Image (spheres, rainbow, N blue to C red):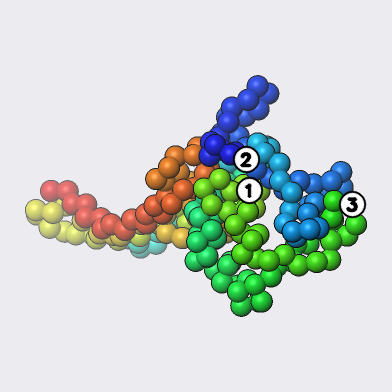
Amino acid sequence: GSSGDFGILKKGGSYNDIYGRAFLRDDAGHIVINSATGIPFFVDEKFLGNPNPKFIAGWKNVFSWSGFSLQCLVDGKFGGKVLSITEAYLDQLGVSQRTANTRDQGQNIFIANAVDENGNEWKGSTNAKEYYKKISGKTPVGEAYLYNATSIRLRELCFTYQFALNDKMIKNLKLGITANNLFFFYRKAPFDPEQVPGVNPGGVGVDVFGLPNYRSIGFILNASF
């Protein structure tokens, strides 16, 4: 994690496993806070997750009526985790919506489900600027920037009309419009989980200022003579 290499292949693991820094937790899963600073303790190179989906499902249907045809494809990928280094950079620079919210709320954050180093319930607040300085940036606490990779999208939509012609030259004529990757019905990650890593490849499922996957729209003209 400290080197910036998030995709690590280990014996007994799975391809594309993501490792990185994580919050130190006690046996009950509570985040452990340094009571002197209000900042959590961290551990290095912990397994964070894997971007590969648990299963993939799709639904395709074609509706036809009097020369009109509507074809759609909805597909979903369920399970897996992805990591956003982009979000970590934005937090470090103080230009994310997340950091804007903390400024509006008094520049302090409350870390829930936490205890101090003595095991007592943590009831204090943490200075947001100091917190994000510690967890964000190029080598962030990956656990804080891990997202559910589940997504359901309208992958393809095609609408056509078949003209009924009685012409000596043109036997058949079909006009239509087709589109791909139109929108998401469901997505938790701040980026498309299928997009490539970006400007600094960190492994599959790790976004580093990657360009968004594009939406394409085209026209169909099909004629036979």
Vertical relation: 129 (above or below) 24: below
Residue at 35% across, 60% down: 159
What is the tally of numbered marks visible in this picture? 3
| SS category of the residue bearing label 2 | strand
Disc nearest the viewer among 2 and 3: 3
Find residue 200 and report its horizontal and vertical position in percent.
43, 42
Amino acid type indicated by mark 1: Val
Judge from the rendering whether residue 32 lies leftward or rightward of residue 119; answer left or right: left
In depth, the one of 134 and 181 nearer the eye is 134
**Figure quadrant of the N terminus:** top right
Seen from the viewer's position, the closer of residues 49 and 93 is 93
Image position of 148 with respect to 122: above or below: above
Along the polypeptide, which appears first: circle 2 or circle 3? 2
Do residues under tags 1 and 2 come within 8 Å of each other at their CB atoms? yes
* Kind of element beneath mark 3: loop
Across and down, in percent, residue 156 comes to 42, 53
Residue at the far front: name it. 36
Judge from the rendering whether residue 115 lies leftward or rightward of residue 180; answer left or right. Answer: right
Note whether residue 142 is visible: yes
Where does residue 75 sit, x and y in percent of width and height?
52, 49
According to the picture, the residue beneath numbered tag 3 turns out to be: 118
Residue that extends furthest to the left in the rendered view of this protein: 169
- Give the residue type at disc 3: Asn
The crowd level at tag 2 (other Cα within 10 Å; few <14, some 14-19, many 20+) is many
Front residue of 167/202: it is 202
Q: Amino acid at mark 2?
A: Gly
Q: Label 1 belongs to which residue?
A: 141
